[in-house]
């Protein structure tokens, strides 16, 4: 703990863990359960990312890297990994449908707003939107999910109206926790990239923050920042859609990559020693 290089890392880790532990305790996750997950991640990362090129990563080497005993490494390797593929696919599909409805000119009205869509039928319909941007998921299942989260409204004339600007789960804790895993991991991965000397250069990572704002300003800033951020993200969504092979099959090129930009809002009472 006296190492001057590690002190900032330990302080940063405490800041990361405090809100995470709050979420874990609120959901009934004990320390012992969390500790096993942490051990699993240590072993998995050490096995996959800290090996010697051309050599199989041994239990002994993982033990040396992680500080866990060989017996503990072997035990942890037998633990099952909690996959969340279903939530990932549901989130991605629903998000693509909403984004395309707001972006694709075929699904906009004459004023450039998301058009009212019939559920099925020839030409432009909700069913066609789902088929083009949500793969082989049944139209009804997608509609039910979007109705469940309040993203769309089923009108009396059997038309569907888009209400949401993006896919934001409102009622499901599982879906919200899924977003915790994906969004926070992306941010930390960007910071990790920027801490290293990478030949492609640093990734964009900025924020704007002031620490002496009155209470009365916050509601206005929430609305203002939300409106500006949504417009910015929608402009980037239109650009990325033109270069994504799922959305635009004519796009050529090598490899398969994921890229994007996330924006998050935060506010809290100011405290000097908060960590």
Image: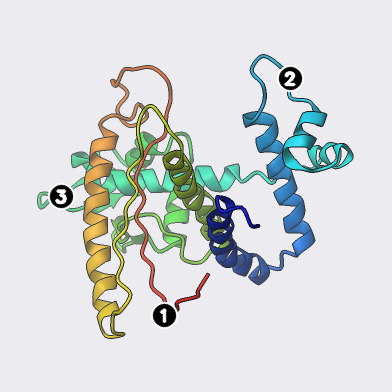
Whole-percent x, y for residue 138 in the image:
48, 41
User: Is residue 48 left or right of 118 when viewed as pictured?
Assistant: right
Q: Nearer the viewer, mark 3 or mark 1?
A: 1
- Relative to residue 273, is residue 36 depicted above or below? above
The residue at the far top in this view is 54
Residue 266 appears left or right of 74? left
The mark that comes first in sequence, 2 or 1, is 2
Q: Which residue ends up furthest to the left in the rendered image?
A: 111
**What is the x, y in percent for residue 171?**
51, 66
The secondary structure type at the circle numbered 2 is loop
Among the 4 quarters of the image, the one containing residue 222: bottom left
Q: Can residue 140 be seen in this view?
A: no
Q: Can residue 133 be seen in this view?
A: yes
At 28% from the left edge and 35% from the top edge, which residue is drawn?
241
Binning the other alpha carbons within 10 Å of mark 1 as few (below 14), some (14 to 19) or many (20 upward) gives few
Label 2 sits on residue: 56
Question: What's the CA distance linking mark 2 and mark 1?
Answer: 50 Å
Residue at 44% over, 62% down: 149
Pick the front one: 133 or 261? 261
Count of marks, rendered view: 3
Of residues 219 and 73, which is closer to you in this image?
Answer: 73
Observer-nearest of 247 and 57: 57
Label 3 sits on a secondary structure element that is loop
Which residue occupies 72% across, 64% down?
29
Which residue corresponds to mark 1?
269
| Marks 2 & 1, CB-CB < 8 Å contact | no
260 left or right of 64? left
- Give the residue number, with chain letter if any, for mark 3: 109
Separation (CA) of disc 3 from disc 2: 58 Å
Q: Which of marks 3 and 1 is nearer the N terminus?
A: 3
Q: Earlier in the sequence, mark 3 or mark 2?
A: 2
């Amino acid at each position: 703990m006296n190492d001057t290089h590690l002190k900032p890392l330990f302080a940063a880790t405490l800041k990361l863990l405090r809100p995470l532990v709050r979420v874990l305790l609120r959901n009934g996750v004990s320390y012992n359960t969390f500790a096993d997950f942490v051990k699993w991640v240590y072993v998995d990362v050490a096995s996959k990312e800290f090996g010697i090129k051309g050599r199989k990563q041994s239990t002994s080497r993982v033990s040396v890297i992680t500080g866990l005993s060989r017996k503990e490494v072997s035990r942890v390797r037998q633990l099952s990994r909690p996959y969340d593929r279903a939530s990932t696919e549901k989130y991605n599909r629903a998000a693509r449908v909403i984004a395309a409805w707001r972006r694709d000119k075929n699904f906009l009205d004459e004023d450039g707003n998301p058009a009212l869509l019939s559920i099925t039928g020839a030409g432009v319909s909700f069913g066609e939107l789902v088929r083009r941007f949500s793969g082989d998921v049944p139209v009804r299942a997608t509609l039910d999910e979007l109705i469940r989260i309040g993203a769309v409204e089923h009108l009396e004339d059997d038309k569907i109206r888009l209400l949401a600007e993006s896919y934001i789960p409102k009622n499901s804790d599982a879906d919200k926790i899924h977003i915790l895993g994906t969004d926070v991991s992306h941010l930390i991965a960007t910071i990790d990239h920027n801490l290293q000397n990478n030949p492609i250069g640093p990734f964009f990572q900025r924020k704007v923050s002031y620490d002496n704002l009155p209470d009365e300003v916050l509601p206005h800033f929430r609305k203002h920042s939300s409106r500006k951020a949504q417009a910015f993200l929608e402009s980037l969504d239109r650009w990325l859609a033109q270069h994504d092979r799922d959305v635009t099959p004519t796009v050529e090129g090598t490899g398969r990559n994921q890229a994007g930009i996330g924006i998050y809002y935060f506010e809290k009472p100011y405290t000097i020693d908060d960590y």
